[in-house]
């Protein structure tokens, strides 16, 4: 299996500094800063990248799980809201990830869809990697 790579460089102090993050594949490179992470500044942040990883993994895994159950989806779209909160003892933590997915799957009833989607939420590789983080799911069958 391939090993995936990413790179980040930070220059300067926490609040005045700035950095860049990049995927090893070259598909993404972006700036980040204290402001883009903890406020509403321009640029990306690690939490957005985790959200993209979670949404991408979930959508792909749900498609696979639906296929294994005999249902071929036309479309699966997922948004991941990554909630970053201060910890009472200091520092920050990803408190939870809220997944919202909508899928178009011909011939599938909602109860079966919900069961399959919950299994995917618990078992996709990124969910497992983030094991100590609460991951909620709101799944809609179109």
Image: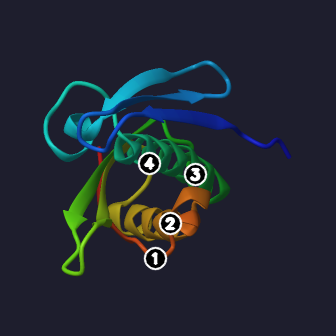
The image shows residue 111, relative to residue 16, as above or below, that is below
Name which residue lies at 21% across and 64% down.
85
Q: Are marks 3 and 2 in contact (CB under 8 Å)?
A: no
* Element carrying mark 2: loop
Q: Are marks 2 and 4 in contact (CB under 8 Å)?
A: yes
Using the image as rendered, state which of residue 133 and residue 119 is in the foreground.
133
> Does residue 46 show up?
yes
Q: Are marks 4 and 3 in contact (CB under 8 Å)?
A: no
Using the image as rendered, state which of residue 133 and residue 142 is in the foreground.
133
Residue 135: x and y, percent? 36, 67
Residue 5: x and y, percent? 69, 37
Give the label on residue 61, or none: 3
| Pointer 2 residue | 130
Q: Is residue 77 left or right of residue 2?
A: left
Name which residue lies at 49% across and 21% down.
29
| Pointer 1 residue | 132
Which color scheme does this rendered protein use? Answer: rainbow
* Label 3 to label 2: alpha-carbon separation: 16 Å
Using the image as rendered, state which of residue 8 and residue 49 is in the foreground.
8
* Label 2 to label 4: alpha-carbon separation: 9 Å
- Alpha-carbon neighbours of circle 2 within 10 Å: few (<14), some, or many (≥20)? some
Residue that sits furthest to the bottom in the current view: 89
Q: Is residue 76 left or right of residue 17?
A: right
* Element carrying mark 4: helix
Give the label on residue 50, or none: 4
Quadrant of residue 33 within the rendered picture: top left
Residue 79: x and y, percent? 32, 44
Q: Earlier in the sequence, mark 1 or mark 3?
A: 3
Q: Earlier in the sequence, mark 2 or mark 4?
A: 4
- Alpha-carbon neighbours of circle 4 within 10 Å: few (<14), some, or many (≥20)? some
Q: Which numbered disc, 3 or 2, marks the residue closer to the eye? A: 2
């Amino acid at each position: 299996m391939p090993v995936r790579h990413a790179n980040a460089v930070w220059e300067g102090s926490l609040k005045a500094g700035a950095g860049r993050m990049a995927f090893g594949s070259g598909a993404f490179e972006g700036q980040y800063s204290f402001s883009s992470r903890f406020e509403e500044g321009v640029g990306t942040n690690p939490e957005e990248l985790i959200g993209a990883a979670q949404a991408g993994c979930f959508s792909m895994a749900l498609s696979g799980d639906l296929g294994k159950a005999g249902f071929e989806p036309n479309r699966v779209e997922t948004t991941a809201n990554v909630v970053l909160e201060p910890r009472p003892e200091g520092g920050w933590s990803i408190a939870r990830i809220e997944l919202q997915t909508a899928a178009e799957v011909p011939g599938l009833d909602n109860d079966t869809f919900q069961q399959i989607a919950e299994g995917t939420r618990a078992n996709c590789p990124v969910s497992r990697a983030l094991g100590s983080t609460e991951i909620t799911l709101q799944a809609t069958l179109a």
